[in-house]
Amino acid sequence: MSLSDCINGSNTQTDHHYSLHSLPMAENYGKRTFFDFNHTNVPETLDVKWVPLLSLSNLRSISKVKVVSFLIGLTLTFLIMASYILTWDKKRLLLTPSPFQLRSVGVPNSTATADDSSEKILIDMKLLVKIISSKLEYKPRNVPDEKDVIETDSHLFSVIPRHFLPSIKSPCWYEEFSSKLGNDLYRRNLFTLRSKSFRGVCDRLRTNFQQHLYHRNGKVFRLRCLPFFYIIGQPKCGTTDLFHRLLLHPEVKFNTMKEPHWWTRKRFGYIRFKDGFQEKFPVEDYLDLFDLAAYNIQEEISGNSSGDHHTLQLITGEASASTMWDNQAWSYLHGDREETEPPFLAQDFIHTVQPGAKIIIMLRDPVERLYSDYLYFKMANKSAEDFHQKVIESVKLFQSCLSERSLRSCIYNTSLSNTMPVRLNLGMYIIFLLDWLTVFHREQILVLRLEDYAANLKVTIKKVFDFLSVGPLSKQVEAALTKRPMSNTRRAADRNLGPMLPATRDLLREFHQPFNHKLASVLDNKAFLWSNT
C-alpha cells in the first residue's frame, strides 16, 4: 500500500501505532458469528392450518419445494436486517467481511522485519523527498513592519528604551524607581514561584537592594539589563551543557536562569501549552532575571567594587531552547485569523527591542536529535520499535500537510505539531534559521554542531568566547571548564534501550536529506550534511 493510501484511509477505532504499509486486523473489532445454511433441516410435510388466508385449493397448487425456498429466503432476509441494526455503529452488515481482514499488522520487532518495512517505505520516501526539495525553494517571509510589532505589545516597548548605555557592554539602561524603598520588589515575581535557585538569588538581591540604586537630580534609578546573548536552540543539542560551561567565565558568571522561555511562552501566559492559559509573566519579571549582573555592573559604576575594572564588560545571557522554533502561542491567541503561518515570530520582538543581540545556535544530526528527544520526553513504554512506529506516523502526517499547505506552514502548524507523536519538525533546522536571518545579520548568529562540541570542547568553547568578545581564561578556569561533567546526559535506563532500529535511521536520514543539504549550502559548511554520522 502506498503512503498516500495509508494517509487517505480512515478508521477512528484503530491504534495509531501501525506500520506505514499496514492497518489493524479485523480481530480488533470483536468476533463475528457466521451462519451456515447448507444443512438446514426442513420438514417434508408442512401443517398449513396456521395460515388462514390460504385456501386449501390454492395451497395444493404450491409445491413443497417452493414453500421451503420461500421460508429460507424469509429467514435470511430477517437475519440480514437484524444484523444491520445490531451493527449500525460499524456501518456494515454482520455477514459482510471486514475490509481490514485483507490487511495485516506489521510492527517491526527485529532488525529483519524493520528492514523489510523500510524497503516498502523507501518508494514513498523518494516521492516525499522530491516534494520537500521542490518546496524548499521559496521566497523569504514578509517581515512585519516595526510599527506593527510594537502595536502588538505596547507595554513591552514602553518599558524597554530604544537606546542603551554606551559605556556598558550589555544592553542596559536606567529605569526610574518609583516604588517605596521598603517594598519587596521580588515577592510577586512569577519566576520565583517556579525556580528555587532564582528564589535564592532574589533573597540575596533584596537584602542590599537600596545600595544598588542610582541617585541623580533628586530622582532614584535602578539599572536594568536585557540579555547580551541568546542561546536559542535546539532541544537535545547540548544547550544546557554549553550554558553552564559559559557561566564559568568571570564575565558571564552572573546569569541566574537557563530557560525562562519568556519570549515564546510565558509572556503570553503559557507554561506548557497542553495545560492551557495560566498567567502572563510581565516583562518586569523577565528583567529581574538579569538583576544580579546589573547589580555588579552598578557597583563598578558607583565606585564600590573591589578593584575589578572588568565589571563593565560583564555580559548577560539566557538559553531557552524554544526560542528558535516555538511560535505556537499565536495560534492560541489568534485562532480566528485566516493566516496559515504566524504573522509574528519571536525574533521580530527580540530584534525590535535589541537589534544588536548575539544569537547562538547549537545543532546536531537531526536523526539522533529526534531519538534523544523521544527518550527524554516520553516517560513510559519506550522502545526502539515504538519509536519506529511514531516516526512513521509523524512522516505520514507531515506528508498529508504538505499536500495542502506550504512547507513553512506545515512546520509552524500547531495542530500538526500537537498531533505528531514525535517532534519531527524540530529537526528541520534550515526553515527556522532562514527566518532568523530575515531580521538578524549572518555575523550576529553563531551556528555550532554538537558533534564538534563533544569531539573538541576547547576549540568550540573558544569559538563561542571569541564570538561574545570576552577575555581569555586563566589556566585554572580553563581546566575547570574542560573537566566539568557533561550536563543533561542520557539516563541509564534510556541507554539500556539501545540505539534506534537501522530501518528508522535510514528512513529519517532520507527524510532530512533535503533540509540538511540546504542548511549546509546556506552555512557553506558540508559538515551540516551529517553524512558521516
Image: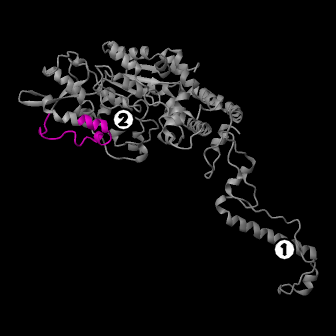
- Mark 2 and mark 1: Cα distance apart in space: 75 Å
Tag 2 residue = 261
- Say which element carries label 1: helix
In this rendering, position of residue 129 left or right of residue 232: right
Q: Residue at x 13, y 37 (%)?
A: 178
In this rendering, position of residue 396 left or right of residue 224: right
- Say which element carries label 2: loop
Residue 385 is inside the magenta segment? no
* In the rendered image, the vertical position of residue 75 relative to residue 302, given as above or below: below
The amino acid on which the numbered mark 2 sits, given as a three-letter code, is His
Q: Looking at the image, can residue 154 be seen?
A: no
In this rendering, position of residue 307 left or right of residue 399: left
The amino acid on which the numbered mark 1 sits, given as a three-letter code, is Leu
Magenta residues (range): 177-202
Q: Looking at the image, can residue 102 be seen?
A: yes
Task: Tell me where residue 26 appears, x and y as whole percent.
Answer: 71, 53
Tag 1 residue = 71
Q: Residue at x 9, y 28 (%)?
A: 215
The quarter holding residue 472 reads top left
Residue at the extreme left: 218
